[in-house]
């Protein structure tokens, strides 16, 4: 059991915040003490539901000396400014993805956190899931041999069918909102990417929200990328905000010299995992432990809090998140200008979860 609790507050009380707060309230290493939102009424609603204080502003929250860790759940384009303000106020930060929408900003945040001796972590962390850790364990065990090729395919559907505010997601683009998941998963398992070639297009420009509001998108809702990793792996990533219920879903297939590993979802912690020896059929691989049903988005918040208490590094780091931002930016550059784009940043890959070693 932890020797104490890390006092934390959530900034941004939007669609994902309930899923974070529900889980954080169950963590032995965390004490959820407050909320802030651009709409003070939403912060008050969260405080009434989960306990703690509703702060009138981010400035007021950061002025509270008892808050150690800020969980940033604001929209994509606000991340850089919010994280920077938190770090300058001396707070550790865990943020939803992406860390920033420009690599220069992501790099600045990592350097600022290091200079102030603060922890900075970022989603996505689905590599911490039971299915994902199971697939990684099979790959580390060498049953597939050297892995040379990965297919990662995401049919993420039309988010306006369920999300109350879909426009910012279409504005930032499919690769920044969803492609970031398999990119983080793959860099966790195989290390840094060194070259990216990508293309994309708007497949379905005219959209309608569930309330009937019409809007038009101009950022590609379909992206296809070739990723070349430092260690020799080649990966194909395809992602779209169009296909509903397609069989490809969000699976990844890892192909090696001696066989293949299939992970049924980049996101679902209970996804199927299968292994096929070379030229043999796939067979189910049992999970390393009973999986969480769905996706536990706040799992890295718990892991960071435990790391803070124990005085060890956390697994989800700003450096890896910044590397992924550089990959995403390289994808955009390649789509705009054509041809391959180099990726230069580095990071230390996180170790497997203790229960999956």
Image: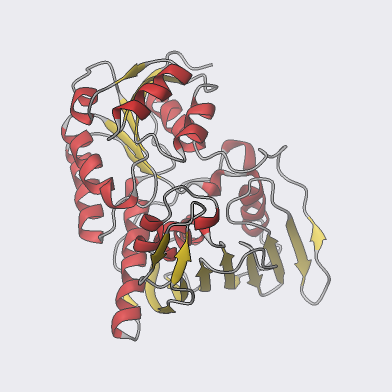
What residue do we see at 31% from left, 67% from top?
A: 329
Question: Which residue: 52% across, 53% down?
Answer: 210
- Colouring mode (rainbow / by chain / secondary structure / one colour): secondary structure
Residue 304, relative to residue 335: is it above or below?
above
Seen in the picture, residue 199 relative to 256 is either above or below; the reply is below
Q: Is residue 192 visible?
A: no
* Image quarter (top left, top right, bottom left or bottom right) of the C terminus: top right
User: Outermost residue, bottom direction?
Assistant: 339
Q: Quadrant of residue 174?
A: bottom left
Callout count? 0
Residue 94 is situated, as x and y percent measured from the top left of the image, at: 36, 37
| Rendering quarter of residue 200 | bottom left
Rendered position, 332 above or below 131: below
229 left or right of 23 in image:
left
**The one of 230 and 175 positioned closer to us in this rendering:** 175
Look at 39% across and 36% down and name the residue there. 313
Q: Nearer the viewer, residue 348 or 58?
A: 58
Position of 88 compared to 214: left or right?
left
Residue 221 picture location, percent across and down: 45, 70
Residue 112 position, x and y percent, is: 18, 43
The image quadrant where one finds the N terminus is top right
Horizontal side of residue 87 vs 207, given as left or right: left
Question: What x and y, as percent, mark residue 310?
Answer: 42, 24
| Residue 74 can be seen, yes or no | yes
Q: Nearer the viewer, residue 202 or 256?
A: 202
Q: Is residue 84 left or right of residue 40?
A: left
Outermost residue toward the front?
Answer: 212
């Amino acid at each position: 059991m932890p020797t104490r609790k890390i006092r934390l507050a959530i900034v941004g009380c939007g669609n994902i915040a309930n899923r974070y707060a529900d889980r954080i309230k169950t963590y032995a290493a965390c004490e959820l003490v407050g909320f802030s939102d651009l709409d003070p009424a939403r912060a008050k609603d969260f405080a009434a539901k989960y306990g703690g204080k509703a702060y009138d502003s981010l400035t007021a929250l950061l002025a509270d000396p008892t808050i150690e860790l800020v969980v940033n759940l604001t929209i994509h384009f606000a991340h850089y400014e919010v994280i920077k303000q938190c770090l300058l106020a001396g707070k550790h930060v865990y943020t939803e993805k992406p860390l920033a929408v420009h690599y220069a900003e992501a790099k600045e945040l990592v350097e600022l956190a290091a200079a102030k001796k603060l922890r900075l972590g970022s989603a996505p962390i689905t590599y911490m899931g039971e299915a994902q850790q199971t697939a990684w364990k099979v790959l580390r065990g060498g049953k597939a041999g050297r892995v040379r090729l990965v297919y990662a395919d995401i049919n993420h559907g039309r988010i306006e069918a369920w999300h109350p505010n879909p426009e910012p997601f279409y504005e930032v683009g499919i690769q920044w909102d969803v492609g970031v998941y398999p990119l983080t998963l793959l860099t966790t398992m195989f290390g840094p990417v060194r070259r990216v070639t990508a293309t994309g297009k708007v497949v379905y420009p005219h959209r309608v929200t569930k309330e009937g509001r019409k809007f038009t998108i101009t950022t590609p809702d379909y992206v296809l990328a070739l990723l070349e990793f430092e260690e020799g792996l080649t990966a194909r990533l395809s992602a779209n905000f169009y296909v509903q219920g397609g069989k490809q879903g969000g699976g990844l297939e890892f192909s090696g010299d001696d066989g293949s590993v299939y992970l049924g979802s980049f996101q679902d912690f209970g996804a199927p995992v299968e292994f096929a020896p070379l030229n043999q059929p796939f067979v189910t691989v049992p999970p390393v432990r009973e999986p969480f049903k769905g996706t536990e988005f706040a799992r890295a918040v718990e892991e960071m809090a435990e790391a803070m208490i124990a005085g060890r590094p956390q697994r989800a780091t700003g450096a890896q998140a910044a590397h992924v931002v550089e990959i995403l930016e390289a994808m955009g550059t390649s789509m705009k200008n054509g041809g391959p784009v180099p990726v230069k940043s580095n990071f230390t890959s996180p170790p497997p979860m203790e229960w999956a070693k």
